Amino acid sequence: MPSYILTTLQAAVLSGISNILAQFIKAYREEVPQLQLLPIPPRTQADLKPIQRPYRITIRPLLTFVIFTILSCPPNILWQDFLEEKFPGYTYSATTSERVLDRSNTARKLLFDQTLGAFVNTLAFVAGMAAFKGKSAVAVRRDVERDTIPLMINGWKLWPMVALFNFVFVPVNRRIIVGSAVGLFWGIYLSLFAALD
């Protein structure tokens, strides 16, 4: 099996797991009463118990996330290959023939990945989620205009560190998996974000 197919399947599985976890979190939040600062205390202990309903996985958002990952992973693999080809992370020392981290190339990769790469991926995510929900072109555009930049800003709290770790320590053919493993938790956030509408 070609490595990009295996990587895509692994990323899709992790994406599915993150969506299921997000659905659990959302269901838990909706069923457990929030603490409220009310002057009147609850009358009985039963007032504090969560409503007991069987948990059901909602298939549509799960499939949406998995399909989006299957569609977006191969271009991201190509993006990582392109960045490594244009800005090799390591060079060989002329004197000792040891591999040496090329800091300027690593900084360039980080800059391109966290600006152009982040913008394209975030825009594709917002537009894709809106389209999968069956929204009109006007509504998709509205979502893109409203959500892309705030989501990128939230992403910059996590992804630059992951990208730097990847560029310095992880071979190019494994970067998507490392990103997907971290993305398991990011995917929970995105699943909850996508469920807002």
Image: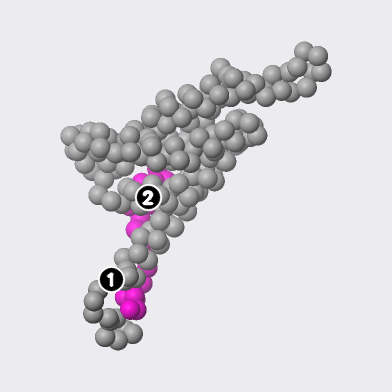
Q: Residue furthest bottom?
A: 44
The residue located at (29%, 39%) in the rendering is 147
* Along the line of sight, the residue nearer the viewer: 67 or 162: 162
In the rendered image, residue 173 lying in the magenta stretch gets the answer: no
Q: Which residue is mark 2?
A: 191
Quadrant of the rendered image containing residue 57: bottom left
The residue located at (38%, 58%) in the rendering is 23
Q: Residue furthest front?
A: 39
The numbered disc on residue 22 is none
Amino acid carrying mark 1 in the image = Leu
* Along the line of sight, the residue nearer the viewer: 7 or 161: 161
Question: Which image quarter holds the N terminus?
Answer: top right
Instruction: Please determine whether, in this image, residue 147 is positioned above or below residue 107.
Output: below
The residue located at (71%, 23%) in the rendering is 100
The stretch of residues the image draws in magenta is: 48-68
The residue located at (23%, 43%) in the rendering is 134
Quadrant of the rendered image containing residue 70: top left
Residue 26 seen from this side: yes
Q: Secondary structure beneath disc 2?
A: helix
Amino acid carrying mark 2 in the image = Ser
In the rendered image, residue 59 lying in the magenta stretch gets the answer: yes
Residue 128 seen from this side: no
